[in-house]
Amino acid sequence: MSRTRLERVRASVGIASLALQQIEDDLSADDVDQEELAAILRELIEDTDPPGGFMAAVAQLLTVAARRAEQVEPDRDGDASCPLHEAAALITDNAGQRLIWAARALHPQQGGI
């Protein structure tokens, strides 16, 4: 295993964790009302930056890991790749849809999420 690659991944995870902590802090602020909370939730799922939204980016990361697992897993039996594909699908189908429902319940938008 390339130590440099693992170090880059660790650094990237650390950066992502800090960014997520900032979002968590913003969500916890006492002055966040339902409209702003809905807007924050929409930012996680809308096709902005990254394309497809944050949730889609996480699902894509898991899909890439699943594809790599398909190539390297012993016996190519799906023991590693299938759970990764399923996790990506759960994020896209379940978590993403529930964020949409929550945002709409908090603050409905005309013609949008």
Image (cartoon, rainbow, N blue to C red):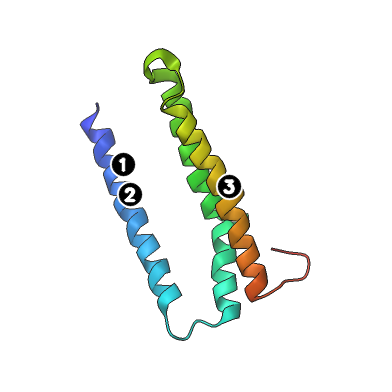
Which of labels 1 and 3 is toward the front?
A: 3
Query: Which residue is located at x 43 percent, y 74 percent?
Result: 26
| Precedes in sequence: disc 1 or disc 3 | 1
User: Outermost residue toward the left?
Assistant: 3
Quadrant in the picture for residue 77: top left
| Residue 45 seen in this snapshot | yes
Q: Identify the secondary structure beneath mark 3.
A: helix
Tell me the quadrant of the picture where the C terminus can be found. Answer: bottom right
Query: Which residue is located at x 51 percent, y 47 percent?
Result: 57
User: Amino acid under label 3?
Assistant: Thr
Residue 17, percent from left and from top: 34, 57
Residue 80 to residue 49: above or below: above
- Per the model, the C-alpha gap separating discs 1 and 3 is 23 Å
Question: Mark 1, residues whose alpha carbon is within 10 Å: few (<14), some, or many (≥20)?
Answer: few
Query: Which residue is located at x 71 percent, y 73 percent?
Result: 108
Residue 55 to residue 82: above or below: below
Q: Which residue is mark 1?
A: 9
Q: Identify the secondary structure beneath mark 1.
A: helix
Who is closer to the viewer here, 93 or 20? 93
Residue 21, percent from left and from top: 35, 65
In the picture, measured across the screen, residue 77 lies left or right of residue 112, that is left
Residue 32, percent from left and from top: 50, 81
User: Amino acid under label 1?
Assistant: Val
In the picture, measured across the screen, residue 93 lies left or right of residue 6, that is right
Q: Which residue is mark 3?
A: 92
Q: Identify the secondary structure beneath mark 2.
A: helix
| Residue 52 seen in this snapshot | no
Which of labels 3 and 2 is toward the front?
A: 3
User: Amino acid under label 2?
Assistant: Val
Quadrant in the picture for residue 73: top left
| Precedes in sequence: disc 3 or disc 2 | 2
Q: Which residue is mark 2?
A: 13
